Image: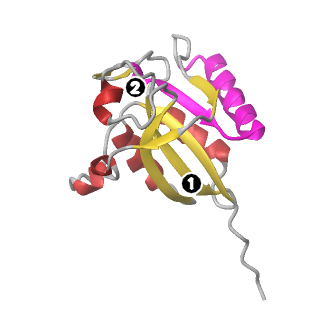
Amino acid sequence: MSRQKIPQIEIACFGAGCFWGVQYKFDRLDGVLKTTAGYMGGQKDEPSYNDVCSDKTGHAEVVRVEFDSNIVTYSELVDLFFSLHNPTQRNRQGMNIGSQYRSIIFYYSEAQHEVALKKFMDLQRSERYKDDLATEILPDSKFWMAESYHQKYLEKKGIDSCAI
């Protein structure tokens, strides 16, 4: 008789440019239970999309990822995060310009912090990029859920893939 493992639910949070494509990609990873687009890292309570786009609140567009660490590890999530964008671009990703599009990892435990730092340092040393990484690695802060029309945006629009 086999026993199923009890889910080990953890939270991770990543900003890698526009949250629409980031959410889309994390949603497709086995072991990810739920994603939520939102804002993190700023000074204003309950920021709106327009507030964040003003580039005056300090928030980043992020995706909060709830995952079962029995199925997918935090290390694998960080690998996906780094594969989704150019982590050397400061305050932008592609044509999206502003501090809200910065490359950022918010960690929820010392173990996550250590993994994120190791992945960052390994990538920095790898010579994959000629420029230094601009990714910020910070402790978690207040997460503000983005407006409902931003949640699963690409799926709502019938887009079944997204180049980030």
Magenta segment main secondary structure: helix
Res 92 → quadrant: top left
What kind of element bears circle 2?
helix
Q: Amino acid at mark 1?
A: Glu
Res 38 → quadrant: top left
* Residue under the point 72% across and 71% down: 6
**Tag 1 residue:** 66
* Residue under the point 62% across and 26% down: 137
* Residue under the point 31% across and 35% down: 49
Place of residue 5 in the rendered image (x, y in percent of width and height, measured from the top left): 73, 72
**Tag 2 residue:** 100
Does residue 51 show up magenta in the picture?
no
Check disc 2: other Cα within 10 Å, few if <14, some if 14-19, many if 20+: many
Is 94 on the left or on the right of 15, as rendered? Answer: left
25, 33: nearer the viewer: 33
Place of residue 87 in the rendered image (x, y in percent of width and height, measured from the top left): 49, 23
Check disc 1: other Cα within 10 Å, few if <14, some if 14-19, many if 20+: some
Q: Amino acid at mark 2?
A: Gln
> Residue at the top extreme?
131
Does residue 122 show up magenta in the picture?
yes
- Where is the C terminus found, in terms of image quarters? top left
- Where is the N terminus found, in terms of image quarters? bottom right
Q: Which residues are magenta?
A: 99-128
Place of residue 51 in the rendered image (x, y in percent of width and height, measured from the top left): 32, 28
Q: How many numbered badges does the structure rendering display?
A: 2
Looking at marks 1 and 2 on the same chain, the residue that comes earlier in the sequence is marked by 1
